[in-house]
Image: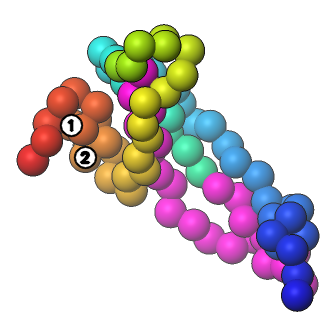
Amino acid sequence: MRSWGRTCENNRFEMLEFSDQGDASLIRSRWHLAAPRSGEEVPVQDFTLVVWWDGPDPARPTRMAAFFEHEEALAKASGDTG
């Protein structure tokens, strides 16, 4: 059985853009994934991480979520619950 570490050893996370939206941070992101045997890059859609910092400890996030649509991430970070 292969370990998760070996599967991910040639993969990397790229932060494309970082911005703050009130109590949330938006991180436009891209994974660069490589096929385990060939090492060829596997295409993956860019995404936006939203990290909320609205808890009692300002250095610890309270929650996070990932969205493929940046506008949806922006709406969630702004407090849209719909």
Residue at x 62%, y 70% (from the top left corner): 43
Q: Determine the image quadrant of residue 74.
A: top left
Q: Residue furthest left?
A: 82
Residue at x 25%, y 46% (from the top left corner): 72
Residue 39, above or below 17: below
Label 2, on which residue?
A: 72
The magenta stretch spans residue 6: no
In the rendered image, the quadrant that contains the N terminus is bottom right
| Real-space CA distance between mark 1 and mark 2, rounded to the nearest whole angstrom | 5 Å
Q: Are marks 1 and 2 in contact (CB under 8 Å)?
A: yes
Q: Which mark is residue 75?
A: 1
Camera-side residue of 24 and 39: 24
Q: Which mark is residue 53?
A: none
Picture coordinates of residue 47, whole percent (x, y): 47, 51
Residue 40 is at least partly visible in this image:
no
The answer to whether residue 26 is left or right of residue 22 is right
The answer to whether residue 64 is left or right of residue 29 is left
Residue at x 35%, y 19% (from the top left corner): 54
Q: Determine the image quadrant of residue 50.
A: top left
Residue 43 is at least partly visible in this image:
yes
- Looking at the rendered structure, the kind of residue marked 1 is Ala
Magenta region: which residues? 31-53
Picture coordinates of residue 57, whole percent (x, y): 49, 13
The magenta stretch spans residue 43: yes
Picture coordinates of residue 56, whole percent (x, y): 41, 13
Q: Residues within 10 Å of mark 2 (few under 14, many from 20)?
A: some
Camera-side residue of 34 and 4: 4
Mark 2 falls on what kind of element? Answer: helix
Q: Residue furthest bottom?
A: 1
Residue at x 88%, y 82% (from the top left corner): 2
Residue 47, above or below 2: above
